[in-house]
C-alpha cells in the first residue's frame, strides 16, 4: 500500500473521531486505531502472566517470595542436578488423571522414558505429558492445578 494512502487514512481517522479503521487491499491489511477519540477514554489493559514476577517482587528478599513467582535465576538455583522435564505447552498442570486418583508419580518414584508424569489441560484438551528420561523423580517443581508456561520446569529426574 502506498505511503501517501496510509497518511491520508491516518489523517481521516484522526479527524473523524472514529476509534479504528481496518482496510484490506489484496493480501495487504491495514488497521489504524485512534486512541485519542474525544468522546471516549481508551483504557489499555496489560496482562502479566503470574509466572513473571513484578519488578517490586524482584527487589524483595527471594526467601519471602512464593516459589511460583521466583525469578528464573533464583528458581534455577533451587533445582537440583538431574534432567529437567519442561512443559511443552501453556496450560493447567495436574498430577493425577482426576481428583480421586493417586498422582501419576511422586518424589522418589522410578520412571521410564515414555511413562506418563502428569496432564496439562490446554483449551479444554487433556494432554498426557510423558517422561523424556529414565530415572528417579528428584523434585516436582509445580503445584497441582497450577498454571504453567511453555518451557517451564516441571520435574527433575536423575
Image (spheres, grey):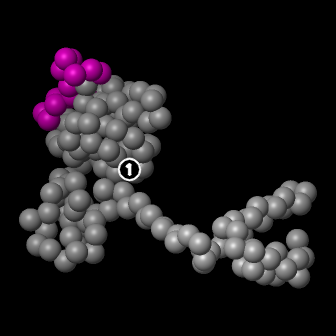
> Image quarter for residue 109?
top left
Q: Of 50 and 7, which appears nearest the observer?
A: 7
Residue 153 higher or lower than 35, as above or below: above
Residue 10 visible in the picture: no
Q: Is 99 within the magenta?
A: yes
Type of secondary structure dominating the magenta stretch: loop
Residue furthest front in the image: 39
- The residue at 27%/42% (across/down) is 146
- The residue at 31%/57% (across/down) is 51
> Image quarter for residue 67?
bottom left
> Image quarter for residue 40?
bottom right
Instruction: Please indicate whether residue 71 sits to the left or right of residue 64 in the image.
Output: right
Residue 30 drawn at (x, y percent): 77, 65
- The residue at 88%/82% (across/down) is 4
Magenta extent = 97-111
Q: Is 15 within the magenta?
A: no
Residue 117 drawn at (x, y percent): 30, 30
Q: Of 111 and 102, which appears nearest the observer?
A: 102
Q: Quadrant of the C terminus?
A: top left
Q: Residues within 10 Å of mark 1 (few under 14, many from 20)?
A: some
Instruction: Please indicate whether residue 41 sits to the left or right of residue 36 in the image.
Output: left
Instruction: Please indicate whether residue 149 sits to the left or right of residue 140 in the image.
Output: right
Residue 75 visible in the picture: yes
Residue 44 drawn at (x, y percent): 48, 67
Residue 151 higher or lower than 145, as above or below: below
- The residue at 21%/17% (across/down) is 101
Q: Quadrant of the N terminus?
A: bottom right
Residue, disc 1: 149
Element carrying mark 1: loop
Q: Of 78 and 51, which appears nearest the observer?
A: 51
Residue 115 higher or lower than 30, as above or below: above
Amino acid at each position: 500500500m502506498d505511503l501517501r494512502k496510509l497518511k491520508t487514512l491516518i489523517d481521516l481517522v484522526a479527524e473523524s473521531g472514529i476509534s479504528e479503521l481496518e482496510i484490506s487491499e489484496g493480501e495487504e491489511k491495514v488497521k489504524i486505531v485512534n486512541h485519542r477519540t474525544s468522546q471516549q477514554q481508551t483504557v489499555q489493559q496489560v496482562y502479566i502472566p503470574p509466572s513473571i514476577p513484578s519488578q517490586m517482587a524482584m527487589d524483595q528478599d527471594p526467601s519471602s517470595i512464593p516459589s511460583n513467582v521466583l525469578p528464573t535465576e533464583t528458581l534455577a538455583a533451587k533445582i537440583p542436578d538431574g534432567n529437567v522435564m519442561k512443559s511443552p505447552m501453556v496450560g493447567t498442570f495436574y498430577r493425577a488423571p482426576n481428583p480421586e486418583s493417586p498422582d501419576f508419580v511422586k518424589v522418589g518414584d522410578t520412571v521410564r522414558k515414555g511413562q506418563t508424569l502428569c496432564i496439562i489441560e490446554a483449551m479444554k484438551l487433556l494432554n498426557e505429558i510423558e517422561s523424556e528420561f529414565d530415572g528417579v523423580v528428584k523434585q516436582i517443581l509445580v503445584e497441582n492445578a497450577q498454571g504453567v508456561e511453555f518451557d517451564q520446569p516441571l520435574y527433575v529426574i536423575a
